[in-house]
Amino acid sequence: MKKIIHRTFFIWNFEKEIAWLNEMSRQGWQLCRAGFFVYEFEQGQPGEYQYQLQLLRKTDPDYLAFLEETGIQVVGRCLNWIYLKKKSDGQPFEIFSDLEGVLRHLDGVLALCGVIMAVNVLPGFANLANSHLQQLSWLNLALAAVGAFGFCKLYLRRRALTAGQDLHR
Amino acid sequence: MNEHIALTEAFYYILLSLYQPLHGYGIMQKAEECSGGRVRLAAGTLYGALNTLQDKGWIEALPCTPGSRKKEYRITAAGRAAVENELARLRELVKNGEQVTGGNPV
């Protein structure tokens, strides 16, 4: 049996998305496809798999093959985000076990928020005076605000992760 | 100067694991086993570390065996030298620490 769920997660909330996918797994629903705001699940064993999400900076076939070699399957892809699953083995499923890796990944998501902000803020203000493009302009400004909000949230998260690290290097 | 910079635990255990040729999953298992389950290398971290170590010339990828997609790695002479440097650094840390504290656990 399969079911399709439409749900929205903002990119800075990717950890919430992971937690939701793991909760679905605990309820016996295993992700088999993911796209823009759409998730397809199939019924399986409760808790059989654990999930992770990763934003790739570039497509590296060697990396995907390496993940597979370590028992991690790519179950879905949405632009540069990949949805990963691994058979539950009683240990938490993480993609990065070092702080530098976690921060590098976070920096990629931060940069994405920055790009969303940057590409929308200029046309947003530029078209504000043009009555024909005013609706589009507000859409641009709304997207720029979303990007800026995500950027701030992730920046604070990054700062919290690095706090106190100097002592332990 | 660079050889005196401390290795991270991940790099240290990857290098130790590769005194025998191993593929990615084998390195994860070996590092966990060596550290008594304390050091668990995640796939993304291990992949990045293997690329860095290859770029430094401390490990090398072995030619793939026919019919296998798994890439095996092995430590190089430069990698062994890096491990030796790290061991010397750790010995010095322990020696100095024990001299000051008397080597008695708190």
Image: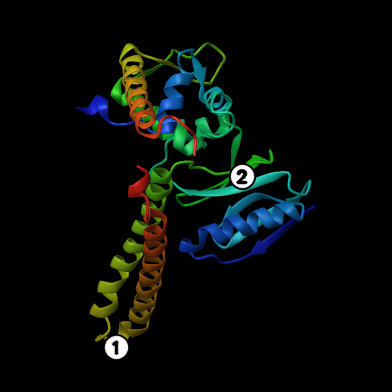
Q: Quadrant of the C terminus of chain A?
A: top left
Tell me if mark 2 has few (under 14), some (14-19) or many (20+) residues whose alpha carbon lies within 10 angstroms of its own: few
- Closer to the camera in the image, B26 or A137: B26
Question: Could you say which quadrant of the image residue A21 lies in?
Answer: bottom right
Query: Chain letter of disc 2?
Result: A
Query: Chain letter of disc 1?
Result: A
**Residue type pointed to by label 2:** Pro
User: Relative to A165, does residue B91 appear above or below in the rendering?
Assistant: above
- Closer to the camera in the image, B94 or A12: B94
C-alpha separation, residue under disc 1 versus residue under disc 2: 54 Å
- Residue A163, horizontal then vertical, whole percent: 37, 56
Circle 1 sits in a helix, a strand or a loop, which is it?
A: helix
| Residue sticking out furthest to the left | B1
Query: Between disc 1 and disc 2, whose residue precedes?
Result: 2
Asked whether disc 1 touches disc 2, contact meaning CB atoms under 8 Å apart, the reply is no
Q: Are marks 1 and 2 on the same chain?
A: yes
| Residue at figure coordinates x 70%, y 56% from the top left | A24
- Residue A49, horizontal then vertical, whole percent: 69, 44
Labelled disc at residue A117: none
- Closer to the camera in the image, B74 or B92: B92
How is this picture coloured?
rainbow
Check disc 1 and report the residue beneath it: A131
**Residue type pointed to by label 1:** Ser
Check disc 2 and report the residue beneath it: A92
Circle 2 sits in a helix, a strand or a loop, which is it?
A: loop
- Residue A141, horizontal then vertical, whole percent: 34, 77
User: Relative to A123, does residue B63 appear above or below in the rendering?
Assistant: above
Please count the marks in the image.
2
| Residue at figure coordinates x 26%, y 27% from the top left | B4
- Residue A109, horizontal then vertical, whole percent: 40, 56
- Closer to the camera in the image, A160 or A147: A160
